[in-house]
Image (cartoon, helix red, strand yellow):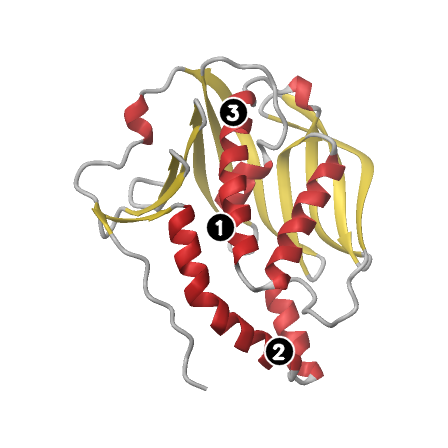
Amino acid sequence: MNRVALAGLLLTAYAGTLHAGTVLDIVNRDLANKSESPARTYAQAGKMRIDAGGPQDSFAIFRDETLYTFDPKKKTYVAMDRATIKQLAEQLNPALKMLQEQMANMSPEQRAQMERMLGTKLPGAKAPVEEVRKTTRTATAAGHSCTYSEILQDGVMQAEACVVPAANLAGSQELYDAALKVSALLRDMVNSLDLPLLQQMADRQLENFDKLGGIPVVTRTFEDGQPVHEATVKAIRNETLPDSLFEVPAGYKRQDMPSMAAPAR
């Protein structure tokens, strides 16, 4: 999942009180390239839509236990439901088994390079020590006061989040309800794949988020001790949304997921 989608799910992990739809505006900043792009998340009645950037940027819709991802430039979309996940897993698992066998034979240098790319330890290595450390630093985002927590791995900063108590951020109930459904679908996908590394990464992210004790309104990720990406909530509001917002737009053609058979050994 990309950072916009991940930020949208993290920001909705706790519930407030709401009966209409919710609109969440986020600004994503690439701190290395000094660029930024907006993202907007809509949620209502268990449905969710995430728009990343402008009209030609990708977007995603979740409804009826199906996740749709859209390519506006090609006017195509891919639909993923549990039947698709099962089919994909049956194709991928033989290749993933081979990949794990290859990783077991990597040199220490190759493992270190792969771990840097993945941002986590490969299976068989000593598990990193992770810590969520609360601080007294504060900030304000979307009109809400928040307090920073730091996420460290083997003592090295990986991320920080400025957190608002769930009860203080109105409008999260619709987002929370939809996020639960999306998370369940994604968890089924992760659990169906024969890749413990991916399962460990997903479990660790959820465990760390639970320790934050609130909703992040500012998140930053770090590489080599330097912040490289930032996501900030700019606004959250209640609004009754048209159901058409969560439907496949006219003119888009469904694209089948590519076949992924394991290569010959």
23 or 102, which is in the foreground? 102
**Is residue 68 shown above or below 119?**
above
The mark nearer the N terminus, 1 or 2, is: 1
**Is residue 29 shown above or below 40?**
below
Q: Where, by quadrant of the figure, is residue 201 drawn? A: bottom right
The mark nearer the N terminus, 2 or 3, is: 2
Image disc number at residue 235: 3
**CA–CA distance in space, label 1 to label 3:** 21 Å
Report the amino acid beneath label 3: Ala
Labels 2 and 3 touching (C-beta < 8 A)? no
Report the amino acid beneath label 2: Met
Please tell me which residue is depicted at 49% across the width and 43% down the height of the picture.
Answer: 185
| Lateral position of residue 186 relative to residue 264, left or right | right
14 or 145, which is in the foreground? 14
Report the amino acid beneath label 1: Asn
Image coordinates of residue 75 in percent, x first then y, are 22, 48
Q: Is residue 167 visible?
A: yes
Image coordinates of residue 187 in percent, x first then y, are 55, 47
- Residue under label 2, please give it: 103
Image disc number at residue 2: 1
Please tell me which residue is depicted at 29% across the width and 32% down the height of the picture.
Answer: 247
The mark nearer the N terminus, 1 or 3, is: 1
**CA–CA distance in space, label 2 to label 3:** 44 Å
